[in-house]
Image (cartoon, rainbow, N blue to C red):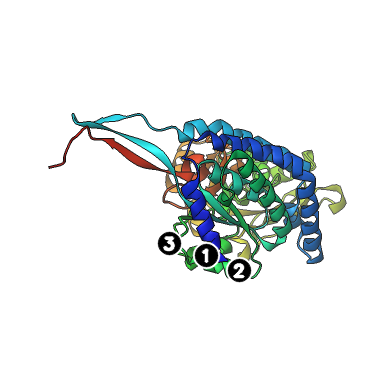
């Protein structure tokens, strides 16, 4: 079964039209049309997955990651439009450049080949995986979590219908359901047949894929992200940045887990966070390190406030809370903040709030992450938001691509050398 899957994917890449063919534009249009037409069936399958997850006792945060709604359809339709609008620029051949007096060189885009995506609970990733790599000529094998098996099968049918309508090989998209990981382990041992591995999910999933396989990895690592609040910061902005970095998508990889705040403004910062929570009626759990002064408002009756204060534990350092929880950890200054990030951060997204330009400049120089946000929300680390284009993940690796993995990162290039009869010797 595994061998058949790999042969089908490779044959699909080999027989598909070259990168930039109009068939890929048609595919984008067709998948949007078929998503809309089949969405009731997709929602029905998704409801079964969610019901089974509820029976298994999954947390509300994880259930929310599984669930699809009409809003998701709108977002996926917009994604197809964005990919379609980007294809011409991404797939255009480069202009020729002279090579001395004897010829010219240029680059033309080529697919990476067979892409294996391993991910967990978000069914929207299935559509992203079936769209972005395929739009630039790759074949993709998608392996989602068992929690979304029925949803994935419904979405696989949508992708295959769209491929057929666009005149592309249906083998460009394969969705596998392997709850026991047998097939996953077999595929991870096939660098001869799979060109790129893209794991998306928890740090444990990323680590498993890295250690179990020698296939080149574009790693979308976990987001143990920090926001450092300097004593010079506008604390109202810092509070809003902290809440916006966490609450809209508590389980996303670009959310904040810990706020590192200078000791002398820690109490005022916590008070600002609680006030901001009350203004927007935004529930948040704030875990305070033992030496963090508690603001006077901490004694307000629980029934009259949307926030909750708790105690930050040692095991909270370097973890993703995956819910509306954020830690507050006082530091002596930028040096301690930088050391803390170096020890506990995952290299995904880090941020600083300060009005002192020397502080922000030094922070960006010393902190190493795929993105560093100055005076804003960590959730700005996103391909479309940054104007970089649609993305399939955010890479924390150092090779090939770091940060948003856009369409341009899903192709490689061939050099075309027009030698005009020139011989090397």
Q: Secondary structure at mark 2?
A: loop
Q: Earlier in the sequence, mark 1 or mark 2?
A: 1
**Crowd around label 1: few <14 · some 14–19 · many ≥20 (10 Å):** few
Front disc: 2 or 3: 3
3D distance between C-alphas at marks 2 and 3: 20 Å
Say which residue label 2 marks.
181
**Crowd around label 2: few <14 · some 14–19 · many ≥20 (10 Å):** few
Left or right? Give the position of 254 relative to 369: right
Quadrant where the C terminus sits is top left
Say which residue label 3 marks.
192
Q: Nearer the viewer, residue 230 or 415?
A: 415
Q: Is residue 167 above or below residue 170?
A: above
Looking at the picture, how far across and down is residue 22, in whole percent?
53, 33
Tally of numbered tags: 3
Can the viewer see residue 159?
yes
Looking at the picture, how far across and down is residue 336, in whole percent?
50, 54
Q: Is residue 234 above or below residue 157?
A: above
Front disc: 1 or 2: 1
Q: Earlier in the sequence, mark 1 or mark 3?
A: 1
Check contact, mark 1 vs mark 2: CB within 8 A: no
Question: What residue appears at the point 67 percent right and 48 percent down from the top-left corner?
Answer: 124
Numbered mark located on residue 3 in the image = 1
3D distance between C-alphas at marks 1 and 3: 12 Å
Left or right? Give the position of 423 relative to 89: left
Q: Secondary structure at mark 1?
A: helix
Looking at the picture, how far across and down is residue 153, in whole percent?
70, 55
Question: What residue appears at the point 57 percent right and 34 percent down from the top-left corner?
Answer: 25
**Crowd around label 3: few <14 · some 14–19 · many ≥20 (10 Å):** few
Q: Earlier in the sequence, mark 2 or mark 3?
A: 2
């Amino acid at each position: 079964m595994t061998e058949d899957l790999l042969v089908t994917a490779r044959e699909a890449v080999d027989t598909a039209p070259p990168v930039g063919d109009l068939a890929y534009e048609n595919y984008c249009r067709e998948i949007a049309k078929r998503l809309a037409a089949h969405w009731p069936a997709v929602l029905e399958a998704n409801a079964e997955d969610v019901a089974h997850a509820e029976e298994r006792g999954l947390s509300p945060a994880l259930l929310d990651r599984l669930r699809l709604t009409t809003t998701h359809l709108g977002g996926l339709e917009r994604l197809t439009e964005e990919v379609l609008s980007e294809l011409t620029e991404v797939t255009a051949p480069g202009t020729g450049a002279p090579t001395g007096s004897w010829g010219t060189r240029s680059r033309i885009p080529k697919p990476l080949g067979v892409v294996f995506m391993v991910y967990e609970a978000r069914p929207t990733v299935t559509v992203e995986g079936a769209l972005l790599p395929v739009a630039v000529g790759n074949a993709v094998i998608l392996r989602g979590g068992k929690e979304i098996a029925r949803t994935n099968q419904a979405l696989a049918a949508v992708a295959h219908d769209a491929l057929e309508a666009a005149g592309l090989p249906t083998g460009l998209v394969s969705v596998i359901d392997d709850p026991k990981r047998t097939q996953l382990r077999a595929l991870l041992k096939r660098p001869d047949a799979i060109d790129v591995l893209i794991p998306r999910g928890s740090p444990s999933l990323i680590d498993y894929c890295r250690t179990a396989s020698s296939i080149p990895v574009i790693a979308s690592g976990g987001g143990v992200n920090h926001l450092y609040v300097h004593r010079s910061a506008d604390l109202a902005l810092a509070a809003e940045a902290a809440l916006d970095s966490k609450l809209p998508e508590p389980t996303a990889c670009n959310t904040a887990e810990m706020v590192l705040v200078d000791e002398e403004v820690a109490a005022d910062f916590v008070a600002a966070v609680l006030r901001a929570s009350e203004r927007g009626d935004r529930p948040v759990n704030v875990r305070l390190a033992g030496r963090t002064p508690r603001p006077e408002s901490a004694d307000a009756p629980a029934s009259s406030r949307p926030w909750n204060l708790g105690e930050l534990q040692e095991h909270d350092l370097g973890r993703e809370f995956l819910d509306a929880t954020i830690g507050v950890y006082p530091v002596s200054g930028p040096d301690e903040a930088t050391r803390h990030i170096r020890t506990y951060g995952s290299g995904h997204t880090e941020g600083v709030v300060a009005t002192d330009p020397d502080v922000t400049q030094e922070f960006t120089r010393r902190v190493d992450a795929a993105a560093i946000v100055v005076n804003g929300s960590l959730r700005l680390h996103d391909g479309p938001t940054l104007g970089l284009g649609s993305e399939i993940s955010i890479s924390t690796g150092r090779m090939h691509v770091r940060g948003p993995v856009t369409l341009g990162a899903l192709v490689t290039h061939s050099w075309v050398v027009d030698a005009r009869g020139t011989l090397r010797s």
